[in-house]
Image: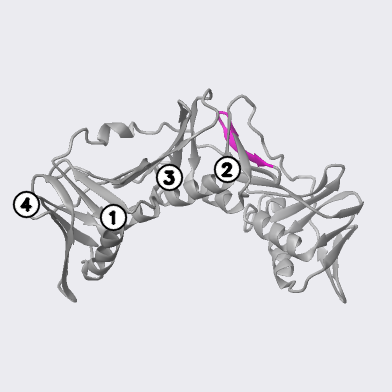
Amino acid sequence: MIISIEKKKFGEAVHTVSRFAERKSATLPVLSAILLIAGDDGIKMRATNLETGIDLKIDGECTTKGVVAIPATVLQQIASSFTQEGKILLEHNGDILSITSGNSKSSIKTVPYEDFPTIPFPENPKNKIELPGVLLRSLFTTIAPCASSSTVRPELASIYLSIEGGVLTAVTTDSFRLAEKKIPLMNKGIQGKFLIPAKNALDIAQAIPDTDITVSFDEHQCAFVSDAGMLVSRLTNAVYPDYRQIIPKESAVEATVLRKDFENSLKRTTIFSDSFQKVKMSFDPKKNQFSLFARNTDIGESSETISAHISGDSLELSFNHRYLSAVLALTQAESISLSAAGIGRPLIIKGVGDTSLLYLVSPMNQ
């Protein structure tokens, strides 16, 4: 194999693909490698950790075809050392890959590529939707942090994706809070639902291009295909809980506040939260005031009052401040509404004018 690639494109490709290689695999060393392929379809890089996989196309010149597997860690260190513009030459001979850049030359010992596993593709091509990559990236990066970090219940460590009526609904929960985001789709005939591990979705989000993405899925895996290549993730084999049952149908009080006021007040209040990260929230409909309060015996206390439009009854609830601040990454609305059904019942936060978001957080003991 002899190929020539621009340094910048090579470095970007190695950085993206190495994310999907195993850090270290004692059972199958090739999983810790990047597969470099030069053939009739052009130049490609592949990597997989059996949970996720990538097949990435790279622009370059192929003089001689071939296949080689290179340790991802070594290749990433070499690629990150290139600082100048220009091209590099990669030549494979025997079990050595030589990388030449100007007056420098590196020789890397390769690993046998014959055991590199096939990256699976969904078997049913009818189950597919199209949406902009930049939109899918934003969806995954904002909603995945609300999933459970524990794998004891794998369904809660996943993103639930449902396609129905021309709408893609994404849901995550860790039992303490729940985030639901909706995206309208061009193709209104497709229906289906699947669970993708949240950690896999975050890795895929880092590699998705801004261009249009075709998402296809079956019972076992989903694929994200673009002109730049393909990303694949295994799916979680579990049943997602019926989360709609915990969403209150009615509210005892509702407040509308400016997002900026809420964000700034919450930021100052959390400085004084206790070891349980507790912040008390108060609704005063008579004065149209919304308040946040926190007390820490070692530091002191803080009280913040925000002008708000409030309807309903007076109410006090306590929350983990981390769960309250998480909603700020989910909507860009200038105002947010907070509605509660009563003591011990969940709080629902929405962006005013943003029909795509529903965020629910459970209260703490007073």
User: In the image, what residue occupies the spot 70% across and 46% down?
Assistant: 228
Pointer 1 residue = 324
Residue 292 at x, y = what percent? 18, 61
Disc 2 vs disc 4: Cβ atoms closer than 8 Å?
no
- Residue beneath label 3, please? 157
Looking at the rendering, the stretch of residues picked out in magenta corresponds to 216-226
Please name the amino acid that badge 3 sits on.
Ala
Residue annotated with mark 4 = 286
- Tag 1: amino acid: Leu
Q: Amino acid at mark 2?
A: Pro
> In screen coordinates, is 75 left or right of 330?
right
Q: Is residue 75 left or right of residue 127?
A: right
Q: Is residue 60 left or right of residue 242?
A: right
In percent of width and height, residue 113 lies at: 79, 49
Question: Which corner quadrant holds the N terminus?
Answer: bottom right
Which numbered mark, 1 or 2, is in the foreground of this view? 2
Q: Earlier in the sequence, mark 1 or mark 2?
A: 2
Q: Main secondary structure of the magenta part?
A: strand
